[in-house]
């Protein structure tokens, strides 16, 4: 193990010390409050709840990188494994300036519930490097990724912990991790990551999987609420992997995308934004808000525009106590992880907004990651039709399990979804018992 790495055991008999390590992060506080509110509904054993309240393991590493100008810059990197009870841990790797230990720990916890809801044989994990990827050259990103992989080598592996893309990372990032890990172990090991390029053993349809899964959930919610896609509108925050694919999929089914925002600005066109034209515009390296076929608007207006579907697909905690009662959507589809704070959730419970919670809505990514991992281990390849058909089947099954539980027990969709996820992990922990 590298000298810069610190492995932090999660409990070590002092769970409350561990809380403080993560608790400075509002995102982690939010994840833990969600868990405890579900724990009360479910009557989960307190000892198990304590174990689930903190990650199993966290690693903090310093990642020195020689920049293109010859100077050395040291970045902070994190890998957090929330649970290893159900199988290897699984979760994305995020490159963003705001990444910190608490945020990564919260995202790892949500991954555990997500895998539980989808019945996947994984625990939750997440990683991140505090950096601004838009300011790094291709070579700097490669050196950063390879060195980070080396630093966390002791705790990753195809049966231990498998990474995937998240905000700020992509197929190329996964290709570098795959190559670095394979060089270390001495053989090609594609199952060390998912979301790789297809030519390296990636799964056809993985890149689009999260946005597609989001779309399947939205269309199912429309059926439940008796809305026609062709008569519906959507507002989308984030035009990266999740947001852009969801925009394409929704637009193909007749939903009018009337406003989109990203990190640099936002645009609106009430007649419907031409998504293929916008994709071609950004593919040329131009800014979203300079798209000539829509009006630039202030980003702060985006989330409160009246629409059928509001789809946050960027950051956490963008819907909070200050703006929740201003939302004017019928369906809130949480493509991003943790976009709604606990305070906002309480406000929204008093509205008629139908919420598709993040742990269900964006679970398409980890589901197709599971397909990829299985294909790599078995050394075979599914067709795109098979991937999409299986994805749709699993997403709709999970959607209806959540909806049925919510209706039977008079729970919100979020509490129902979290309950299914937490119960699965809690039951597995109970059955396995506590070692030694
Ligand atoms: P991405 O990096 O491809 O895109 C992120 C988008 O968010 C970009 O358009 C960026 O400009 C925008 N953004 C960043 N900061 C913003 C700000 N302050 N205001 C408005 N927009 C902002 O990331 P992604 O993979 O699409 O992930 C988006 C969200 O979906 C994240 O919460 C991620 O955790 C979640 N998610 C992603 C996947 C996946 O498979 N990629 C799976 C599950 C969940």
Image (cartoon, rainbow, N blue to C red):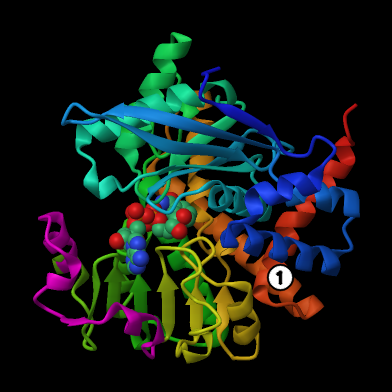
Q: x and y percent of residue 16 in the render?
A: 79, 49
For the residue pair 2 and 383, the one nearer the viewer reads as 2
At x 46%, y 43%, the residue is 128
291 vs 39: above or below = below
- Image quadrant for the N terminus? top right
Q: x and y percent of residue 324 in the render?
A: 52, 84
Q: What range of the chain is rendered magenta?
A: 278-307
At x 64%, y 50%, the residue is 22
- Image quadrant for the C terminus? top right
Please give left or right for residue 217 compared with residue 142 in the image. right
364 vs 62: above or below = below
* Magenta stretch contains residue 431: no
At x 24%, y 88%, the residue is 270
Local SS, label 1 = helix
Q: Which residue is mark 1?
A: 415
For the residue pair 64 and 328, the one nearer the viewer reads as 64
Q: How many marks?
A: 1
Q: x and y percent of residue 53 in the render?
A: 75, 52
Q: Residues within 10 Å of mark 1 (few under 14, many from 20)?
A: many
């Amino acid at each position: 193990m590298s000298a810069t790495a610190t492995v932090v055991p999660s409990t070590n008999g002092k769970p409350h010390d561990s809380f403080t390590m993560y608790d400075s992060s509002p995102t982690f506080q939010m994840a833990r409050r969600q868990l405890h509110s579900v724990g009360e509904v479910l009557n989960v054993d307190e000892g198990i709840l304590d174990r689930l309240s903190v990650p199993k393991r966290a690693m903090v590493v310093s990642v020195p990188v020689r920049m293109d100008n010859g100077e050395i810059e040291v970045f902070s990197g994190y890998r957090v494994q929330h649970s290893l009870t159900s199988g290897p841990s699984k979760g994305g790797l995020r490159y963003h300036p705001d990444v910190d230990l608490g945020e990564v720990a919260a995202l790892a916890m949500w991954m555990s519930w997500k895998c539980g809801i989808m019945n996947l044989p994984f625990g939750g994990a997440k990683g991140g490097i505090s950096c601004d990827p838009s300011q790094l050259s291709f070579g700097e990103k490669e050196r950063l990724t390879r060195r980070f992989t080396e630093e966390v080598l002791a705790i990753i592996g195809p049966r231990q912990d498998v990474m995937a893309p998240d905000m700020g990372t992509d197929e190329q990032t996964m290709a570098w991790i795959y190559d670095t890990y394979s060089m270390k172990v001495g053989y090609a090991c594609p199952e060390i990551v998912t979301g790789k390029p297809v030519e390296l053993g990636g799964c056809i349809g993985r890149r689009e999987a999260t946005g597609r899964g989001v779309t399947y959930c939205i269309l199912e919610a429309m059926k439940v609420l008796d809305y026609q896609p062709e008569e519906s509108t959507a507002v989308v925050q984030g035009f990266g992997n999740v947001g852009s694919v969801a925009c394409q999929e929704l637009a193909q089914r007749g939903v009018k995308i009337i406003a989109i925002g990203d990190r640099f600005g936002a645009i609106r066109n009430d007649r419907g934004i031409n998504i293929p034209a916008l994709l071609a515009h950004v593919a040329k390296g131009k800014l979203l808000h300079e798209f000539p076929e829509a009006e630039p608007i202030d980003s702060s207006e985006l989330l409160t525009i009246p629409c059928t579907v509001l789809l946050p697909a960027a950051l956490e905690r963008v819907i909070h106590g200050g703006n929740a009662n201003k939302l004017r959507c019928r369906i809130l589809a949480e493509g991003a992880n943790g976009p709604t704070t606990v305070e906002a959730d309480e406000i929204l419970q008093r509205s008629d907004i139908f919420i598709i919670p993040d742990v269900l809505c964006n679970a398409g990514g980890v589901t197709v990651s599971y397909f990829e991992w299985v294909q790599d281990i078995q050394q075979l390849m599914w067709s795109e039709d098979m991937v999409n058909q299986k994805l749709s089947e699993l997403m709709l099954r999970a959607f209806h399990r959540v909806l049925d539980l919510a209706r039977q027990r008079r729970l919100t969709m979020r509490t129902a979804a979290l309950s299914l996820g937490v119960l699965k992990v809690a039951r597995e922990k109970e059955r396995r018992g506590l070692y030694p």
